Image (cartoon, rainbow, N blue to C red):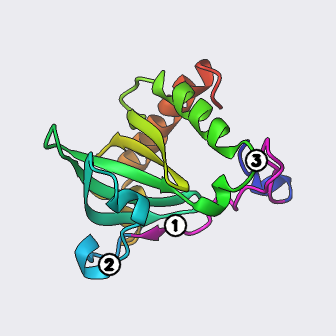
């Protein structure tokens, strides 16, 4: 479920938890490398397939890291799910079911899920890494020109429509 701020606030999710506000801040990567901050989650550091490079961002579900796939030598985004979320009964199973459903999506406006697995007391979701600025970063310097704003909304709507057509929204 999604949050609908016009309907009076948080909407409970399927497991009864409240969703964060629609425009809740996400902590963006601060520019430090993983080795500088020393904050690489132990489950990612112990994962032999991926070498953490730097933290990309932190949100309500966990932390996303830029990592190098050690065999393929390509950049990937690895989301490390927060252990407290996984402490709920059945959470790992729900996470893996959701990942399997997301893996069926293939669309230019949706980041591709490559891999997912339980790791220690957490779970890893490995996704396509898309370099560049986020929409939020672009908006920090002011409003987008109308054509760029319309393109961003159109692209997001196309991705959501594809997910909806596959029963995920």
For disc 3, the marked residue is 89
For disc 2, the marked residue is 38
Q: Is residue 95 above or below residue 102?
A: below
Is residue 169 something that shows in the picture? Answer: yes
**Residue at 80% across / 57% down in the picture?**
10
Q: Are marks 3 and 2 in contact (CB under 8 Å)?
A: no
For residue 135, which quarter of the picture? Answer: bottom left
For disc 1, the marked residue is 26
Query: Neighbour class for label 1 at 10 Å: few (<14), some, many (≥20)?
Result: few
Q: CA distance from mark 1 to mark 3?
A: 26 Å
Question: How far from the left and from the top, in percent, is residue 63?
Answer: 46, 62
Q: CA distance from mark 3 to mark 2?
A: 30 Å
Query: Neighbour class for label 2 at 10 Å: few (<14), some, many (≥20)?
Result: few
**Residue at 15% across / 37% down in the picture?**
72
Instruction: Work out whether residue 140 or residue 121 is closer to the camera in this orientation and state it.
Output: 121
Q: Are marks 1 and 3 in contact (CB under 8 Å)?
A: no
Disc 2 is placed on an element classified as loop
């Amino acid at each position: 479920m999604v949050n609908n701020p016009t309907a009076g606030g948080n909407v409970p999710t399927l497991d009864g938890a409240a969703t964060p506000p629609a425009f809740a801040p996400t902590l963006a990567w601060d520019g430090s490398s993983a080795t500088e901050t020393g904050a690489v989650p132990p489950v990612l550091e112990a994962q032999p397939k991926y070498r953490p490079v730097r933290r990309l961002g932190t949100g309500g579900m966990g932390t996303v890291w830029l990592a190098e796939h050690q065999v393929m030598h390509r950049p990937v985004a690895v989301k490390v799910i927060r252990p407290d979320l996984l402490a709920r009964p059945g959470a790992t199973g729900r996470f893996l079911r959701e990942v399997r459903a997301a893996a069926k999506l293939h669309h230019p406006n949706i980041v591709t899920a490559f891999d997912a697995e339980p790791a220690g007391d957490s779970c890893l979701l490995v996704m396509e890494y898309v370099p560049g600025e986020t929409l939020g970063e672009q908006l920090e310097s002011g409003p987008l020109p109308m054509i760029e704003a319309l393109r961003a909304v159109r692209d997001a709507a196309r991705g959501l429509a594809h997910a909806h057509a596959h029963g995920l929204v």
